[in-house]
Image (cartoon, grey):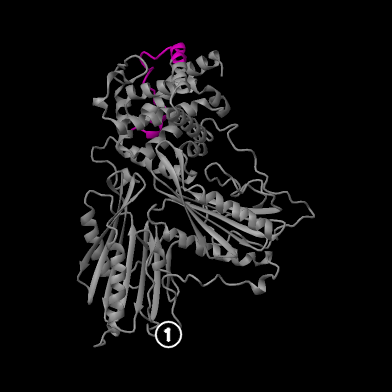
Amino acid sequence: MPDPIDELENFNPGAPMNPLSPSEVRRLGDRHRRRRTAGIALAAAAAVAVIATGSVVLAGGGEPQGLDPAPPNPSESTASGPRIPDSLDITVDLYENESGEPATQRHGDVGLTLVDFCGVTPFADDGRADSVSAATSGPEYSDTREVVLYADEQSAGQALERLTAAARDCPRQESGPDNDTLHRVESWDAGESGVLVVRTYTNSLGAEIMRFTRVGDALLASSTYAEYDPSNTASGEADQARRLKSVVDQMCVFTDAGCATTTEPPASEPPATEPPADTDDIPADFPLAAGWPDRHEPDDRYGLTGPAPDVPVLEALQACGAALPAAASLDRLGAAWANVEDYRYRLLLTFEDADGAIDYQRQLVDAYRACPRTEDGESNASLNDVRQTRVGGESWAVVRTFEFLGAPAIGMEVIHVVRLGRALLVDTAANEGGGGPDPEAQATAQIAEQTAETSAPLAAMCAFTEAGC
Amino acid sequence: MDEREFDDFYTASFTRVTHQVYAMIGNRDEAQECVQEAFVRAWAHRRQLDRAQHPEAWVRTTAYRLAVSRWRRVSLSRRSPDRAVGLATEAPPPSESHVALVAALRQLPEAQRQALVLHHIADLPVQAVAREVGVPEGTIKARLSRGRAALAALLSDDPHSGLQEGATHA
């Protein structure tokens, strides 16, 4: 069997036939130029666009020497200037790199200094007093964090405003041949003022999720890249926010009040399933995670989370690009399971009566039914197929699949919503199915598998029926 | 860039860039035409090219864009024969191994193919590939990883070995 790398590196199909002479190329180039400069305004504008595009692309292409942007000047701190305390640990919940080594943090490193929106690098040369950054990466992900300290709150606020404005002013950027970069900007309720920027690509999988927030005199910047489905980055966003919480909490040292009076994130926009007030409607021993595997790869990212009332589930889902509707539930219990390319969530919601459960089940299903097909850029599309199943009192499955360039793409997510009495079970599984020759057979098998695995929690839901167990 | 510098650049780079674009698009004649046209544009825009400092990357990117644009715009079989800027090219048939490699590359997703060619044929480091393509390094690493696995399966002597499920759409 030939080595594909040898084949590639020795690729030499021979000299081209009948190439133009250099002088002929120049002659045609001169003619091309004359046509441009003599001509129509539209043609000139188009030519400028070509040049501009070429320059942008070229900014990083070719031989690497001399290509790197000017070295950043991340720190102008002096021995007497303000300095980030060494006790600030920004590596908390940062994933290990591909060789299993934990990330380490360093003062004055590049960090996210060169974050770029349409050629604007608002974080570079910004008069910072000190910075500390940490980064980690693997074959399919990279994660970078940086905390930057400024002379005062005003300077930190201005830096955040520059970042936000640069991202907002760059919703779409041509970034390569047939490939545009898209930016979505939203607020982030963390710290004193935060912003979320999600960067996706029109012609490739993957997304870079960036978050910036100010706490006192300092800014936190974070960038996580992974091969997320560009049409649904909600789970990645939720995961990143969760992992940054400890860093944001530690940044209270940069406020005038110190850490004792750090405020909680504002509660103006509660998450979709804000845990209700303490109730004991769902028994503590409810077998929500029963049926899931008990073995996983040895990595902190994998394994079981919960069951517990505060495990986020619906927060990781989106329908038609929007968050799912909030549930006015009486009680909730969530659980999550993760392994390599295997992500599962379960949520049990209980309502005052069956009508409440029926109503919310309809809201969930309708949210997906509203967008059977969503185009994500020129190459990607996500498909939602809602189908009725025969489990419990009433059940529906949402089968989410994806297309790339019109062909079934890797990745399948099944959201099975089962009501029994006044309880609703949301059981989700996302994995690398869906790209094979028969996605429908995979979907049917996936639903059957999830139904079998949830037999124990479904049986326990009899407690929420009129007849009881 | 003066005439002599451009001529040296063209002479030194034309064959190399043509091979790279051929590997990316799978059509040698089309690759040669697009690279030729890219060099014409390079001369027309030589002042900007000077500032960019890396003309070969500019030419490669422009040629690839032209190829993709042409492929999308019209069917190759219906295009006018005078579309090219140069003489008609009728390249001799490439060797069997090149045919197999190019055929395998054409079965890969465009993004994986581009990453493999830039990294392994154009010999660019991952960082430079990421910058040229305009995506993060992690994306390039993933595309290289999956592309190499898929290519190995496609080039396997085992007739039962092929792309694993989903490999063409990673």
Residue in the foreground of this view, choosing between A333 and A258: A258
Please state which of residues A109 and A26 is positioned toward the viewer in this rendering: A26
**Quadrant of the rendered image containing residue A234:** bottom left
Q: Position of residue A299 (x, y in %)?
A: 47, 60
Q: If the image is split into quadrants, where does the C terminus of chain A sit?
A: bottom left
Above or below — where is A48 with respect to B148?
above
Report the amino acid beneath label 1: Thr
Q: Is A11 within the magenta?
A: yes
**In screen coordinates, is B113 left or right of A454?**
right
- Magenta segment, which residues? A1-27
Please state, as top left, top right, bottom left or bottom right, where the N terminus of chain A lies in the image.
Answer: top left
Residue named by callout 1? A279
- On the question of residue A460 being in view, the answer is no
* Quadrant of the image occupied by residue A164: bottom right
Residue at the image point whose x is 48% and y is 21% from the top = B44
* Extreme residue in the right direction: A80
Image coords of residue A368 (percent x, y) = 30, 62
Q: Position of residue A374 (x, y in %)?
A: 31, 53
Q: Is residue A347 above or below residue A401?
A: below
Magenta stretch: includes residue B88: no
Return the chain for callout 1.
Answer: A
In this rendering, the count of numbered labels is 1
Report if residue B67 is visible in the image: yes
Q: Residue at x 48, y 22 (%)?
A: A37
Q: Position of residue B77 (x, y in %)?
A: 24, 25
Depth check: give the residue in front, A77 or B124.
A77
From the viewer's perspective, is residue A127 above or below residue A281?
A: above
Q: Residues within 10 Å of mark 1 (few under 14, many from 20)?
A: few
Residue at 33%, 38% (x, y): give it: B108
Callout 1: SS: loop
